[in-house]
Image (cartoon, rainbow, N blue to C red):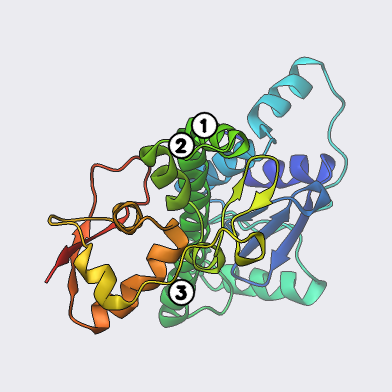
Amino acid sequence: MLRLQEIYDLAADEGWDVDRQGSAHFRLLAPGGHGVVLGPVTAGDQAAVRTLLIELKRRGLDAEQLHAERSGAGAPSAAPSRVPAVIVPGRPVPGGRDAADDERRKRMQEAGFTMANRSTEGETAAEKVARLRREAAEATARLQAEIEVAEREVALEEAAGSFERVNAAVQDGRDGALDDWVAVLGLAPDEAIRAAGFLVRGTGARTSSAAGTRAPRLGVDEVVAKLPSGPFTVADLAAAIDREVGTARNYIPKLLDAGAITESGLDESAPGPRKPKLYTRA
């Protein structure tokens, strides 16, 4: 496996901004600011080094392959490192942030301290625990954000066919399939659905009061009279009262407040990761 210092040097050679963040970790910023990777300060944690290689490779920097290519091409010995020195457990640290920093490390090692015992200079056990928890929280938050983005991409891929069919139906002035509308609306923000008081049809004519085609407003009692007999979604309610989905959604809070309906979980049979809620007549 590559030495930790070699990894950071290769990253710097490839245009990455490699910066040591105090005693906690190294921060590697991809060229153009697209992506941040955190790396360990100590070289003794092989698992952390392996994770660093994986994270760099995911962002386009295959350090192991690059090192092998340079070694196979008979490249001259590397220039002096431009990256702050990493800490190798049990070895003297050849460089640091300044001469005083090097001298303090030297005195600690002469007194019997090694970085295998204390991962960073002057760090107590409690400070180490706090640092590790902080780093774990940062890593967890970063991975969770990546998972959410990946899930969103999967959902969009799964709903791509529904988007195309709904768009074709709208342009042709047709209603389209209910399942396709459920998949599309399931990916739309609730705020956008609530704000949509009309749908665009045909070549662009809007179903609105200005066009003279808006249906008369229904009272809550009238909606209750038309509620489906079994569990239903907002889309089912829209079909039952012959209104758009956005209009039907606006009735849900009123029906809940009136005690006319109750929530009954999610419609697990619906496509996509975002399942619509089910309601039942009270």
In the displayed structure, 99 sits above or below 56; it is below
Quarter of the picture holding the C terminus: bottom left
- Say which amino acid is labelled 1: Arg
From the top left corner, tell me how far across and down residue 29 is, in percent. 74, 54
Q: Nearer the viewer, mark 3 or mark 1?
A: 1
Q: Amino acid at mark 2?
A: Gly
Image spot of residue 26 (x, y percent): 66, 60
Residue name at image x 57 percent, y 46 percent: 52
Q: Residue at x 74, y 50 (%)?
A: 34
Closer to the eye: label 2 or 1: 2
Q: CA distance from mark 3 to mark 2?
A: 59 Å
Q: On residue 165, which mark appears? A: 1
* Drawn side of residue 208 relative to residue 272, left or right: right
Residue placed under numbered mark 2 in the picture: 176
State whether residue 45 appears in this view: no
Q: Residues within 10 Å of mark 3 (few under 14, many from 20)?
A: some
On residue 37, the disc is none
Rounded to the nearest angstrom, the CA distance separating label 2 from label 1 is 7 Å
Residue at 39% from the left image edge and 46% from the top image edge: 182
Q: Position of residue 23 (x, y in %)?
A: 62, 71
In the image: residue 187, left or right of residue 235: right
Instruction: Give the SS element for disc 3.
Output: helix
How far separated are the C-alphas under marks 3 and 1? 56 Å
Residue 237 can be seen, yes or no:
yes
* Labels 3 and 2 touching (C-beta < 8 A): no
Upstream in the sequence, badge 2 or badge 1? 1
- Mark 3: which amino acid? Lys
Q: Secondary structure at mark 1?
A: helix
Q: Which residue is mark 3?
A: 128
Task: Decide: is 175 above or below 75.
Answer: below
Mark 3 vs 2, N-terminal side: 3
